[in-house]
Image (cartoon, helix red, strand yellow):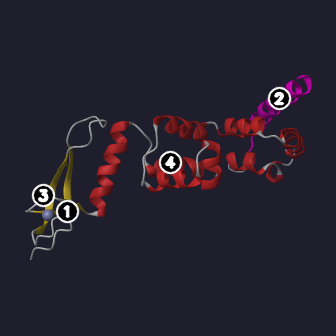
Amino acid sequence: MAKECPICGELTLEPRTGEFRFDPPANIPGGTMVIQDAAWEECLQCGERLLSPELDNALDVEQYKRIGLLGPDKIKDARQRAGLTQAEMSQFLGIGEKTYTRWESGRSIHSKSSDNLIRLADRYPELFVQMEAQRDPNRENLIAEYFRGLDKPRESNTYAMAAHGAELDPALAGLLLERLRLIAENRRKG
Ligand SMILES: [Zn+2]
């Protein structure tokens, strides 16, 4: 029994299963996308196709893969590895929390420059801590607080700790200390 099409209003919407073919927009390379074992509804009158959530998701995954960007799951994994909340991650990336949340839920696609930043945050979370510290108008207090906390890392600067997933190995602590000393020195000089 055919259902009513939400686009043209005719009773010509029919269930379909099998191979689904989709021609993506021109900015996505690789030509026609082909998804096997798909399920969707198609209108015999106007040609509108209504996709199942699974098919919609399969097309999204294929799209992220083709444009070489991290998919929503990978973005979330990166944030969780760094031990950051969505609010903290969006602050590090310099974007609104709502925008960031849409990337993680797959409701919108991030840019290549954001993709670079997310990959950097994943691999070198300490860089983001340093940049935040350098921008902070209250940075001398922040630096002093960080120095005081170095011997008991679990209680120190929450951003630093969050970014390290509550682990700060001695080599990294030494490196951070050195950088922070330089910042403090330059600040005093000029
Ligand atoms: Zn229709």
Residue 87 falls inside the magenta stretch: no
Instruction: Report the mark closest to the observer, 1 or 3.
Output: 3
The crowding category of the residue bearing disc 4, from other C-alpha atoms within 10 Å (few below 14, some 14 to 19, many at least 20), is many
Q: Report the span colored magenta.
A: 167-190
Of the image marks 2 and 3, the number of the one nearer the N terminus:
3
Of the image marks 2 and 1, the number of the one nearer the N terminus:
1
Q: Residue at x 20, y 62 (%)?
A: 39
Ligand 1 closer than 8 Å to the CB at disc 3?
yes
The residue under label 4 is 75
Q: Nearer the viewer, residue 136 or 124?
A: 136
Q: Nearer the viewer, residue 27 or 130?
A: 27
Q: Residue at x 88, y 40 (%)?
A: 147
Alpha-carbon span between mark 3 and mark 4: 35 Å
Left-right relation of 106 to 23: right
Residue 180 position (above or below residue 50):
above
Alpha-carbon span between mark 4 and mark 1: 28 Å
Split into 4 quadrants, where in the image is the C terminus?
A: top right
Instruction: Report the mark closest to the observer, 4 or 2.
Output: 2
> Which mark is drawn over residue 94?
none
> Which mark is drawn over residue 40?
1
The residue under label 3 is 47
Q: Amino acid at mark 1?
A: Trp
